[in-house]
Image (cartoon, rainbow, N blue to C red):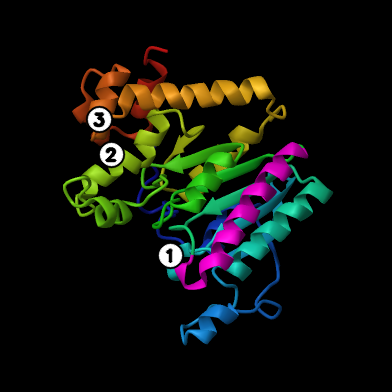
Amino acid sequence: MIPSLASRHSWFEATARARLAGLLDPGSFAEILPPAESQPSPHLAMLDLPGAFDDGVVVCYGQLEKKPIFAIAQEGQFMGGAVGEIHGAKIVGLLRRAVQEKPAAVLFLIDSGGVRLHEANAGLIAISEIMRAVLDARAAGVPVIALVGGSCGAFGGMGIVAKLCSAIIISEEGRLALSGPEVIETVAGVEEFDAKDRALVWRVTGGKHRYLMGDCAELVEDDIPAFRTGVAKLLAGWQEAAPGLAQLRASQQALENRLAAYATYRDGLQVWAALGIARPDSVPLLDRDSLVALKEGLPT
């Protein structure tokens, strides 16, 4: 059900701290490295670029339905949520702490275009450390849930990080991919991908497409309480076995099968038709509940 405009609290439009405040139990949000203890990136200062006291990411602990939770929230309104050295170190530090303290989950509110090019190798190293830390947390029995619905989506290295998480919750407004539309257009030309065609962008990278493809566990409305409900539903009775070799090989085979099936397609409409959707052109107009029902009715 879509909330009324009066009661809606858009995830897409909210800041990182507003998302956390609405996601966690009231009064439980406790920021690690709050403003007085944080520091901006020294790399940006050397380039005479403005920094942010938290370097564009909030790390905290709190509760969700009285369960202990760690949370990471990237601030897409600062440098597109791009990952730099300090930004990445805060994320890695929280994930390593999760391995030791074993919260019920780590919630990763991803809102990022990827690596901060201003910090070059430092940003790339940070992304690799985040990847390892996510997998270490999962191996220790702590689920890492990615929440994607911000204005910057989850692209580049953070797109990979999202797929390394235990599960992804996404809104229709969310986007998830490796290369962003502008990057593809710059490298391969507008004939390959027109980044200004917003409908095409969402048909290829948007939340509805990712949900139909099975990349995301839950599709929710662009509403902070809806993300909270989605997380609570996912964590209720959560069980995740450490992936074994057979499971990893099966996942790799599934990706190879997808590439073989859809590699020549250039639009989500073609993919949706191949999935068995009778009227793929109707998908962008469907509300969340109708899309979920459609997916459940697709042939397996």
Residue at image point 76% right, 46% down: 103
Residue at image point 69% right, 25% down: 244
**CA–CA distance in space, label 1 to label 3:** 29 Å
Farthest left residue in view: 191
What predominant SS class does the magenta segment belong to? helix
Q: Secondary structure at mark 3?
A: loop
**CA–CA distance in space, label 3 to label 2:** 12 Å
Q: Nearer the viewer, mark 1 or mark 3?
A: 3
Magenta region: 116-140
The answer to whether residue 165 is above or below residue 300 is below
The three-letter amino acid code for the residue at tag 1 is Gly
Magenta run includes residue 290: no
Farthest top residue in view: 299
Residue pointed to by mark 1: 80
Q: Nearer the viewer, mark 3 or mark 2?
A: 3
The C terminus appears in which quarter of the rendering?
top left
- Labels 1 and 3 touching (C-beta < 8 A): no
Residue at image point 40% right, 57% down: 152
Q: Secondary structure at mark 1?
A: helix
Q: Is residue 28 left or right of residue 233?
A: right
Residue 203, numbered label = 2
The three-letter amino acid code for the residue at tag 2 is Arg
Residue pointed to by mark 3: 265
Q: Secondary structure at mark 2?
A: helix
Q: Is residue 143 left or right of residue 147?
A: right
Residue at image point 61% right, 60% down: 126
- Labels 1 and 2 touching (C-beta < 8 A): no
Residue 277, numbered label = none
Dot placed on the residue nearer the N-terminal end, 1 or 2: 1
Dot placed on the residue nearer the N-terminal end, 1 or 3: 1
